[in-house]
């Protein structure tokens, strides 16, 4: 990590009862040291229903992009040396939905994991259907593709983290804007239901892939260039928090806390699923430092508010 870095930590806490209980026995000595020497510079209060979670909002603000509907896929193209152009880009993640009369639930994201060969094969199956609607699908990695088309230019989409193990319906994009995508989701469910690709997955004991999630959609502002000093997003706590494995989350937090002892930071942003808090060094002078030492702030109290 470079000097004077802005570190953003996702899933530093959640309001799940298991997490709040885990906080009470979580020792974070290096974070506590920072709390004595630093102060809260900004807070970001949101809601679970926001399409963009706090860590994405913090990243977007630090990069000079809009905090909601941030065009992450187009930004990746730019960072990879590709000119994203005027068309909209998005990430497309194949997934498994559990569909019942009262909800449409996203399975654990790992349920749809594929090898690179499987992912490329599935892309070849689905791509012609998208092409008919002017959408180009491009392989990115085994669990995620790129999608390019005018439909994504102004489309507000929810982050993938929002829907894992949840009913997806509160986070569906605007029906009028996403009518083409919703039709394609229905068509892909019908196509894949009886396809040999699905039969092979079922034979291997894996969940079928029966839908997809669009996220990170949008187009970059004309002439946009990312800042030279970019924030670092640490996602070490993400998987255990999303799985509700709080003993593992505690252990990973302690490992992360140990790394803070040698990190050269200018800012630290702690994010939950609703809120975020950014810490910065105190202004010069003894009075603020004395107040901090006398106050003896505790990490659990700060993290519980996220």
Image: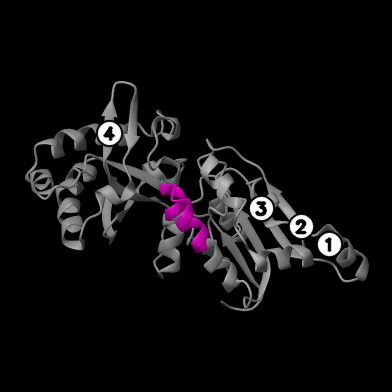
Mark 4 lies on a secondary structure that is strand
Determine the main secondary structure of the stretch shown in magenta: helix
Residue 254 percent location from the top left of the image: 55, 65
Please give the residue where the numbered disc 2 appears in the rendered image: 297
Circle 3/circle 4 CB separation < 8 Å: no
- The quarter of the picture where the N terminus appears is bottom right
Please give the residue where the numbered disc 4 appears in the rendered image: 98
Which label's residue is closer to the chain start, 3 or 1?
1
Q: Residues within 10 Å of mark 2 (few under 14, many from 20)?
A: some
Give the spatial CA distance, label 1 vs label 2: 7 Å
Circle 1/circle 4 CB separation < 8 Å: no
Which label's residue is closer to the chain start, 1 or 4?
4
Q: Is residue 45 magenta?
A: no
Residue 263 seen in the figure = yes
Q: Is residue 247 magenta?
A: yes
Q: Among all residues in the image, which is located at the extreme top?
A: 101
Residue 16 percent location from the top left of the image: 53, 41
Please give the residue where the numbered disc 3 appears in the rendered image: 300
* 39 lies above or below 23: below
Mark 3 lies on a secondary structure that is helix
Circle 1/circle 2 CB separation < 8 Å: yes
Q: Residues within 10 Å of mark 3 (few under 14, many from 20)?
A: some
User: What residue is drawn where x is 72% and y is 66%?
Assistant: 34
Residue 40 percent location from the top left of the image: 75, 56
Q: Among all residues in the image, which is located at the extreme front?
A: 25
Q: Nearer the viewer, mark 3 or mark 4?
A: 3
Please give the residue where the numbered disc 1 appears in the rendered image: 292
């Amino acid at each position: 990590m470079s000097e004077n870095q802005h570190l953003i930590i996702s899933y530093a806490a959640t309001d799940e009862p298991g997490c709040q209980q885990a906080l009470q026995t979580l020792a974070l000595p290096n974070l506590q040291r920072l709390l004595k020497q630093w102060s809260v510079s900004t807070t970001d209060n949101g809601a679970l229903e926001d399409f963009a979670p706090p860590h994405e909002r913090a990243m977007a603000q630090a990069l000079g992009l809009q905090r909601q509907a941030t065009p992450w896929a187009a930004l990746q193209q730019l960072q990879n040396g590709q000119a994203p152009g005027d068309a909209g880009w998005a990430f497309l993640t194949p997934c498994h939905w559990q569909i019942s009369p009262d909800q449409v639930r996203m399975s654990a994201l790992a349920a749809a994991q594929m090898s690179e060969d499987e992912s490329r094969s599935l892309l070849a199956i689905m791509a012609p259907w998208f092409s008919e609607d002017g959408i180009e699908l491009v392989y990115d990695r085994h669990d995620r593709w790129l999608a390019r088309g005018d439909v994504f230019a102004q489309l507000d989409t929810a982050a993938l983290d929002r829907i894992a193990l949840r009913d997806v319906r509160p986070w569906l994009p605007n029906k009028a804007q996403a009518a083409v995508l919703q039709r394609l989701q229905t068509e892909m469910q019908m196509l894949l239901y009886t396809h040999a690709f699905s039969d092979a997955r079922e034979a291997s004991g894996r969940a079928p892939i029966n839908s997809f999630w669009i996220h990170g959609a949008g187009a970059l502002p004309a002439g946009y260039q990312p800042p030279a000093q970019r924030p670092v997003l640490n996602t070490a706590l993400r998987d255990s928090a999303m799985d509700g494995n709080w003993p593992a989350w505690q252990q990973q937090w302690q490992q992360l806390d140990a790394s803070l002892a040698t990190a050269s930071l200018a800012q630290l942003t702690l994010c939950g699923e609703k809120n975020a808090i950014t810490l910065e060094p105190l202004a010069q002078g003894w009075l603020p430092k004395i107040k901090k030492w006398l106050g003896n702030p505790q990490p659990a109290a700060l993290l519980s508010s996220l």
